[in-house]
Image (cartoon, helix red, strand yellow):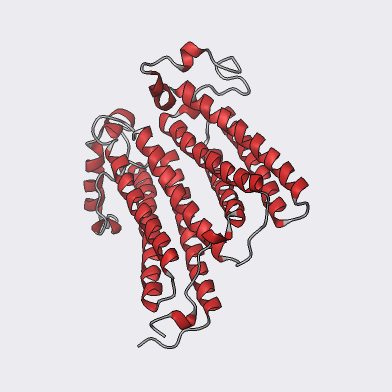
Amino acid sequence: MPSALPSSSRHRRAVRLWLLAAALLVLATLIIGGATRLTESGLSIVEWKPVTGIVPPLSDGAWQAEFNKYKAIPQYQILNRGMTLAEFATIYWWEWTHRIAARVAVAAFLLPFLWFLWRGWIEPPLRMRLWAIFGLGALQGAVGWWMVASGLDTRIDVSQYRLALHLTLACLVYAAIVWTVARLASERRSEAPARIRAGAIGLLVIVLTQIYLGALVAGLHAGLAYNTWPLIDGRLVPATTELFASEPHWRNFFENRLTVQFDHRMIAYALVLAAIVHAVDTARAQPGSATMMGALALAAAATIQAALGIATLLTRAPVGLALLHQAMAMAVVTIAVVHAARLAPSKSAVMVVPAAASPAS
């Protein structure tokens, strides 16, 4: 029989630290995934083996067998023909590390969660939220393999549609965990006018939309085209005939490199402008408050991220700078989530079961 439980405040702290660790692991997986994409390593492992895939090749014969599997797909035949085994090993290790990081993140979330449930430390509302986060994470993993599968038969890369969905789902998992951590951090909620709260939520939506558009840019390699700023294709606003060159018109928003990059630029401008307006409004309404500091931090981070995006574009996306751009995007997501969570109404707060309510005490 488990020993008597500590105080509810210690329960809350333990759950919060667990979720914070899980969020950091998801963040690490996202950053490694970005490096995997930038190094064109994502198709180096052509099979999905959730259990046995944990073990990498351990002999020369095993390495050659993996290399032979890679040689059978179009990416090798068209893009990387003549690649050496050592070069293959480099991209293999990136993809293997990404998959292992994802598995570790899942285990670090699920196993402590089950233990806390057994001890009765989590009340039903939070329990349901955490199961939903786990379900979203499982879906994201399935989409990851679905994404890889899109590049194994006829393409030399993965579908930008699936890449964008995969990345956005991962960001939603990360955002949901960070939101929960922020809500558990304190019983006190920042009081702010309704327009400030709505602005914080609106900015978070714009940030996540920009993440999705950035994934489309990455999937189409649109960052390697139209490498001028502030003009794009010689204009501030491209001609309509070029933006909507394909039929039906909706396909341009997902498949036309010019349109996708232009949309990504416009949303970046909108995000920076909206974040600055929100920060000014918050500073006037609540000068010197924690809410004001959060709004200022978000405006600063969004501005820095936009500058990094411009630098990445002008230099044709070198790996180091492109990875920094992606990492900064996650910093913007983090700040936006924490800022919005602190302003959310108290009725949406999550709680940990007090010690007296635990059936295991």
Nearer to me, 174 or 32: 174
Hey, which quadrant is residue 204 in on the image? top right
Nearer to me, 330 or 43: 330
User: Can you say whether 269 is above or below 46 in the image?
Assistant: above
User: Can you say whether 189 is above or below 359 in the image?
Assistant: above
| Apparent side of residue 51 relative to residue 179 in the rendered image (left or right) | left
Q: Residue at x 52, y 72 (%)?
A: 12
Q: How many marks overall?
A: 0
Q: Position of residue 64 (x, y in %)?
A: 24, 47
Q: Residue at x 22, y 36 (%)?
A: 72
Nearer to me, 167 or 8: 8
Residue 311 in view of the camera: no
Q: Quadrant of the C terminus?
A: bottom left
Q: Residue at x 70, y 47 (%)?
A: 296
Residue 42 in view of the camera: yes
| Apparent side of residue 121 relative to residue 277 in the rendered image (left or right) | left
| Apparent side of residue 66 relative to residue 341 in the rendered image (left or right) | left
Q: Position of residue 231 (x, y in %)?
A: 61, 19
Q: Residue at x 51, y 63 (%)?
A: 20
Q: Position of residue 119 (x, y in %)?
A: 39, 78
Q: Position of residue 257 (x, y in %)?
A: 45, 23
Q: Quadrant of the N terminus?
A: bottom left
